[in-house]
Image (cartoon, rainbow, N blue to C red):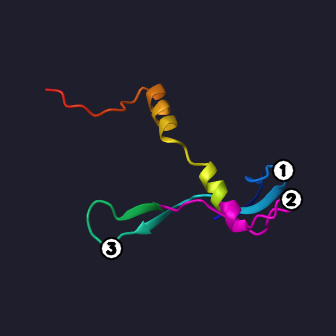
Amino acid sequence: MARHQITFKCPFCNQADITADFFPSIGRERKSTWGGSKPTIIMSGEELLLTIEKCPSCGKSGKDILKAYGKGREIPHTERLKRLQEAGLPTKIENYK
């Protein structure tokens, strides 16, 4: 995994810059123990964000900043539905007889 240093604004006060270590998600091949048509499988790991410092302006800890950073990246359900409809994908499953 390649480590990157990223800088982003504090999610609480939106004034100070927070420096963090970021590990992007990667795929790894893993040998399987069963026989059959797939001798290897690809497992992907999640991205990881580690912060070391706290916010210098509001004083929030690194754990609080990580929680708020993760919540800010979640997409609301209505936004997901809107994206699916714009892409032309069905949003309802119906039985046709």
Decide: is 59 above or below 90.
below
Q: Earlier in the sequence, mark 3 or mark 1?
A: 1
- Where's residue 7, x and y in %? 79, 55
- Residue at label 1? 15
* SS for dot 3: loop
In x, y percent, where is residue 61? 74, 67
Residue 68 located left or right of residue 78: right
Magenta-drawn stretch contains 36:
no
Q: Residue at x 45, y 32 (%)?
A: 84
Name the residue that disc number 3 marks. Answer: 33
Q: Nearer the viewer, mark 3 or mark 1?
A: 1
Q: CA distance from mark 3 to mark 2?
A: 53 Å
Q: Amino acid at mark 3?
A: Thr
- Is the N terminus in the top left, top right, bottom left or bottom right quadrant? bottom right
Q: Are marks 3 and 1 in contact (CB under 8 Å)?
A: no
Q: Are marks 2 and 1 in contact (CB under 8 Å)?
A: yes
Q: CA distance from mark 3 to mark 1?
A: 52 Å
Q: Nearer the viewer, mark 3 or mark 2?
A: 2
**Magenta stretch?**
44-66
Q: Which amino acid, mark 1?
A: Gln
Asked whether 54 or 36 is in front, the reply is 54
Compare marks 2 and 1 and give the one earlier in the sequence.
1
User: In the rendered image, which residue does mark 2 sit on?
Assistant: 57
In the rendered image, the quadrant that contains the C terminus is top left
Q: Residue 28 appears at what percent x and percent y?
A: 50, 63
Q: Secondary structure at mark 2?
A: loop
